[in-house]
Amino acid sequence: MGNKTNQDEAMNKLKEIVFKLKSSLTNTYAINDLEHKVKQHVSFELMRQKMIDSVLTNREKGIIEESAEGERYVVSLTTHGERIEKVFQAIESVFLQSRKANKVVLYLSEDEFLMKELPITLEKQVERGLTIKYVKDFGPYTKLIPALHDFPDANIITVDDDQIYSFNMIDRLVRAHHTYPQAVCCNYARKIKLKDQNHFAPYLSFEHVFNSSYSTSPTYLALGYNGVLYPAHSLHPDVTNEELFRKLSPYADDIWYKAMELLQGTPVVALPRCKSWTDMIFEDLSMQETALILINIDQGKNDDQFKAVFDHYNLYHALTK
């Protein structure tokens, strides 16, 4: 009862703030954008409280040993810096899925965390099935590369550390996988755009994919936002070539994985998504990866990394098949 009262009070205070701010704004876009951000914040705070309550009181296992269909599903994620204090939120939402994974692995940089005491929240989650592994720091690639080494025959679902996932995220990805067993399945994709046969249009011109049913295209770029399922052996063996990916695409793992999918002949399937889909995403705005956004998008490094990777493998033709 106490938690609900606190949540109601917080909601009412936020509504008052929004009302006052809206009264001082005249630009319709600014008003709508503010209202949307506040709604996102309120939704996230409510979900965050649910995750806190669960991690402190729940004793049920967050994983299952075997899947009914015989395939194994491993959820893989990483975190760094002060975000270690909040990563339990994403993990707890994975533990509470309608379809549980066979394994949930948090990969941590051995240089950064091996000698540090972990938060009590993670210790509690280890008791319920979380695996923590200390590995070499691969930057953004730490989310997937170690898992490919550890679980070569499993289907790997990568998730970010700054989101609280809706209860059916894994189920949606697995259902898509059952329909397209050879494809990389994602909840969020952009459509790669070529300026001519050997040059990309600017990354920011790549359209977001909105679709009412499963769709696929050689130009779909699967992005990590809200989960990606990589079937076993769906990526070219070069995927783990550290020397190459650090040289060609050091900050943009999604671009590197796209090249590895094309080399392997693996399609990308985008799950159904409408423009209001983001209302179902609960993300911690205080944990946004501003450094990578600044490098990849604001500084245009995505464009440089696309060119470096596709020039190296001469892959432009694969986007027009």
Image (cartoon, rainbow, N blue to C red):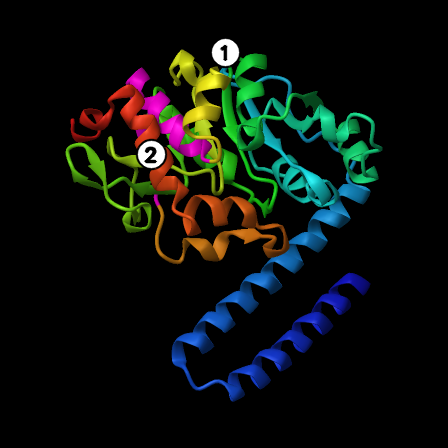
Q: What residue type is labelled 1?
A: Asp
Query: Tag 2 or tag 1, which sits nearer the N-term?
Result: 1
In the image, what residue occupies the spot 75% across and 49% down?
A: 52
Residue 86: tell me if it is visible: yes
User: How far across and how far down the image is residue 239, in percent?
Assistant: 44, 18
The label shown at residue 306 is 2
Quadrant that contains the N terminus: bottom right
User: How far across and how far down the image is residue 14, in percent?
Assistant: 64, 74
Q: What element carries label 2?
A: helix
Q: How many C-alpha atoms fall within 10 Å of the one at disc 2: few (<14), some, or many (≥20)?
A: many
Residue 129: tell me if it is visible: no
Compute the Cα span from label 1 to label 2. 29 Å
| Among the 4 quarters of the image, the one containing residue 140 | top right
Q: What residue type is labelled 2?
A: Phe
| Among the 4 quarters of the image, the one containing residue 49 | bottom right
In the image, what residue occupies the spot 41% across and 14% down?
A: 238
Question: Was residue 261 drawn as part of the magenta stretch in this picture?
Answer: yes
Which label lies toward us, 1 or 2? 2
**In the depicted structure, whether residue 31 falls above or below residue 300:** below
User: How far across and how far down the image is residue 107, in percent?
Assistant: 65, 26
Q: On the picture, is 180 further left or further right than 193?
A: right
Question: Was residue 210 drawn as part of the magenta stretch in this picture?
Answer: no
**In the depicted structure, whether residue 296 falls above or below residue 267:** below
Q: On the picture, is 59 further left or further right than 155?
A: right
Q: Give the range drawn in magenta.
A: 252-272
**In the depicted structure, whether residue 26 falls above or below residue 208:** below
Q: How many C-alpha atoms fall within 10 Å of the one at disc 1: few (<14), some, or many (≥20)?
A: some
Q: Is mark 1 on a helix, strand or loop?
A: loop
Residue for badge 1? 153
Q: Nearer the viewer, residue 213 or 286?
A: 286
Quadrant that contains the C terminus: top left
